[in-house]
Image: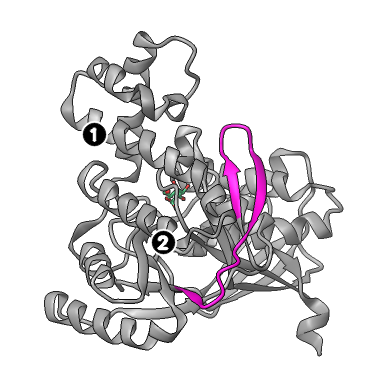
Amino acid sequence: MHAFFAPGRVNLIGEHTDYNGGYVLPAALNLGTWLFVRKRSDTRLRFGSSSFSKVVDVSVRGITYDPADDYANYPKGVVKEFQKRGFDVPGLDIFYYGNLPNGAGLSSSASVEVATAWMLNHFLNAGLSREDIAVLSQTAENAFVGVQCGIMDQFSVAVGQMGNAVSLHCDTLNYRLVPLQMSGLSIVISNSNKRRGLADSKYNDRRRECEQAFLELQKCQSGIKTLADVQSNRWSQLEGCISDSTIRRRARHVVFENERAKCAPRVLREGDLQRFGQMMNESHISLRDDYEVTGLELDTLAEAAWSVKGCLGSRMTGAGFGGCTVSLVQTDAVELFEEKVRRAYLNRIGYEPSFYVTEAGDGVRDVTEEVAR
Ligand code: GLA
């Protein structure tokens, strides 16, 4: 029996910029998915999970998407990607145990995918790098599950390091680690407990809207390769190139959010956490008004957070349409923060949010020895 762990992630800033070739600043969490595996003597793949009662049992040959298999479609997609690359996947019994809330925008699916890919990389001696594992896992989600997600989640889950965020340029996949030296401050995740299904959300619509914006902008400014190539200081000259006002707002979000995500590592390095907090707030407002992916639950959480003394900034994190916010809070004000946000949310929404005080953790890894101890 072997055991592997892949974390979830929280994105600090740079939302809906990844599939536009821009910058993101996520951090791996210390919450995530444990994968336990043993080889079988036949060619069956059996997937079990602590959060889904059915055992999914398929043959390694002829793997197909089946909505009834729920989460197991993610690892099935990963197996398929290894097979496409010519690897002979053996029969396996795999069990997943996770402590990430599902569908909460903390990348539980990327965590399952990357854990599976890391495990297969190990068993098949495939020699894939962490970056390769991230790209393979994203391809599985795009091609097999049909969600056109960007690379941010899988990448941060694969390369994350304790105490650091990952500043990633999603067009080139160049990245660097950004130390989160925030003494006296805590990263608080507030879960709206409103579930979000990426596949049935408006996520793919936003991608199409961005493609349309890019095509129109490209006619005005040749030489841009992605929407995020548009510089924010050129926006006032270029915005008129986009004929539809909704599409224009979508593009404006991407251009200015990308600027924020690009500057964020410098702001953090300089220790200007007040400024970083303001940038988080600006990000939320842009996602609310221009990108329109927040909704009442996330807006209620963010607004309640903004009113708490000791909260430097707060924004939705992940795809939106439900899920979580991330807030930067003075550690000695966390209790007050939770109390005030809980009360405001309960009053307006009618049920309670959940809170997680988190730290940036390590990326995917083998934990067989740790688990055996
Ligand atoms: C989801 C996707 C990511 C990214 C975010 C929005 O988490 O999986 O690729 O697009 O939404 O920033």
Q: Quadrant location of the N terminus?
A: bottom right
Q: Residue 274, which numbered label?
A: 2
Within the image, what quadrant is residue 102 found in?
bottom left
Residue drawn at x 45%, y 44% as measured from the top left: 146
- Amino acid type, mark 2: Gln
Please determine whether, in this image, residue 293 is positioned above or below residue 357. Answer: above
Give the total of numbered labels: 2
Residues 217 and 195: in front is 217
Within the image, what quadrant is residue 60 found in?
bottom right
Numbered range of the magenta stretch: 166-187
Camera-nearest label, 2 or 1: 2
Q: Does the magenta run of residues contain 181?
A: yes
Tell me how far mark 2 sits from mark 1, CA to CA: 27 Å
Residue, disc 1: 249
Residues 342 and 351: in front is 342
Is the residue marked by circle 1 packed among few (<14), some (14-19), or many (20+) residues within 10 Å?
many
Q: Quadrant location of the C terminus?
A: bottom right
Q: Position of residue 88 (x, y in %)?
A: 79, 49
Answer with left or right where residue 271 lies relative to residue 60. Answer: left
Q: Position of residue 130 (x, y in %)?
A: 73, 51
Q: Does the magenta run of residues contain 172?
A: yes
Q: Position of residue 82 (x, y in %)?
A: 71, 46
Q: Position of residue 9 (x, y in %)?
A: 53, 62
Residue drawn at x 84%, y 48% as measured from the top left: 127
